[in-house]
Image (cartoon, helix red, strand yellow):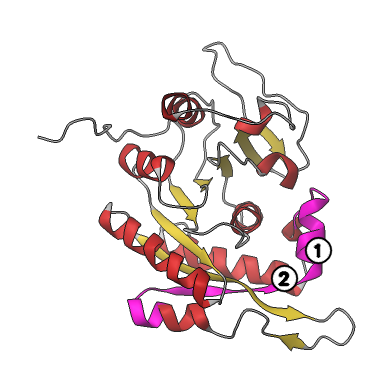
Amino acid sequence: MQRNVPQKRPIPNVKNIIAVSSAKGGVGKSTLAVNLALASARQGISTGILDADIYGPSIPTLLNLEGLEPELDARNFLVPLTAYGLKAISIGFLIPVTSPLAWRAPLLQKALSQLLFETSWPPLDLLVLDLPPGTGDIQLTIAQSLELAGAVIVSTPQDLALRDAVRGVGFWERTGVKRLGMVQNMSGFVCGGCGEVTDIFGGDGAKRKCAELGLDFLGDIPLHASICADADAGKPTVVATPDGPQAKAFGDIMAKISKQIGLA
C-alpha cells in the first residue's frame, strides 16, 4: 500500500485538464500556455488557466491583470478573474508584485491546493495548467492529485533544452499521464524587415526528438518580436493579432490538442 500519495479528485465544474510543462526554464512555456488557452477560447471552448508556477507567476502580467485581486464567494473560494474571455487564477493575484515567496514545501503545497481545489470555476470544458519548469514537487503533486487529460511538453530546438525536455517526457510517462506531444518554441527568428527566417537555436531538433521518442510533434512557434512585445504588453498574440501567422500557429497547435482530448 502506497503511503503519503494524495488521492486523485476532480476540480468541480472542470471537464478536462491539461498541463503545459517544460523541464527547463526560459523556453517560453508561460507565453505558450496563455496563447493556447486563448486560442481554445476563440475556438468556442469554455476555458480557464491556472498559474501553478508559485515562485514565478507570469499569468497576471501576460493577461494584464496585475494589481487586481479575486473576490471570495460564499464558501470563501477564490473567484477567477477574466481577461479576453479567459478565466484565470494565480498566486500572483494574492501577493504584491515585488514580494518574493521564500516558502518551504508545506506552504507551497497549501497554496497549490487552494488554487486547485478552492477556486470557484464556472463550468469549463478545459483548464490549462501553466506549470513551473522542472519535474519537482508541484509537478508530482499535480500528477498524483488530478486526473489529467494529458501533458504538453515545450522545448526550443536547442540540444541543451531538448535534453531536459526528454526528462520531462519521462516524468509524465512514469506518472502515468498521457503525453499529448511536444511544441517547438522559438523555432526560427523571423526578420521584421525582410521576413527571412534564421534558425538561431537550430532547425528541427524537437521534431527529430519526437520521432525518436514516438511522440506527437504538435507544431512550431517562431521566434518573433511581436510575440514577446504582445506578452509584455499584457495582450497575448492570439488576441493582439488574431488573424496573423503567429496566432494561427498557436491555433493550429490547440486544434490538435483539442482533437486528442475529445473537444473537437
Q: Residue 11 location, x and y as percent?
A: 42, 33
Residue 27 shows up from this direction: yes
Q: Mark 2 points at which residue?
A: 246
Q: Is residue 91 left or right of residue 104?
A: right
Q: Which residue is drawn at 48% across and 60% down?
A: 258
Image coordinates for residue 147, horizontal then vertical, percent: 33, 43
The three-letter code of the residue at mark 2 reads Gln
Q: Specify the amino acid type for callout 1.
A: Thr
Query: Which segment did they paint magenta?
Result: 210-236
Decide if residue 240 is in sight here. no
Q: Residue 241 carries which label?
A: 1
Check disc 1 and report its element: helix, strand or loop.
Answer: loop
Residue at the (41%, 77%) spot, across then down: 210
Which residue sits at x=46%, y=28%? 104
Secondary structure of the residue carrying numbered label 2 = helix
In the rendered image of this protein, does residue 170 appear above or below residue 66? below
Q: In which quarter of the image is residue 53?
A: top right
The residue positioned 76% from the left and 36% from the top of the image is 65
Label 1 Cα neighbours within 10 Å, binned few <14 / some 14-19 / many ≥20: some
Depicted 40 relative to depicted 85: above or below:
below
Q: In this view, does 62 lie to the left or right of 148?
A: right
Mark toward the start of the polypeptide (1 vs 2): 1
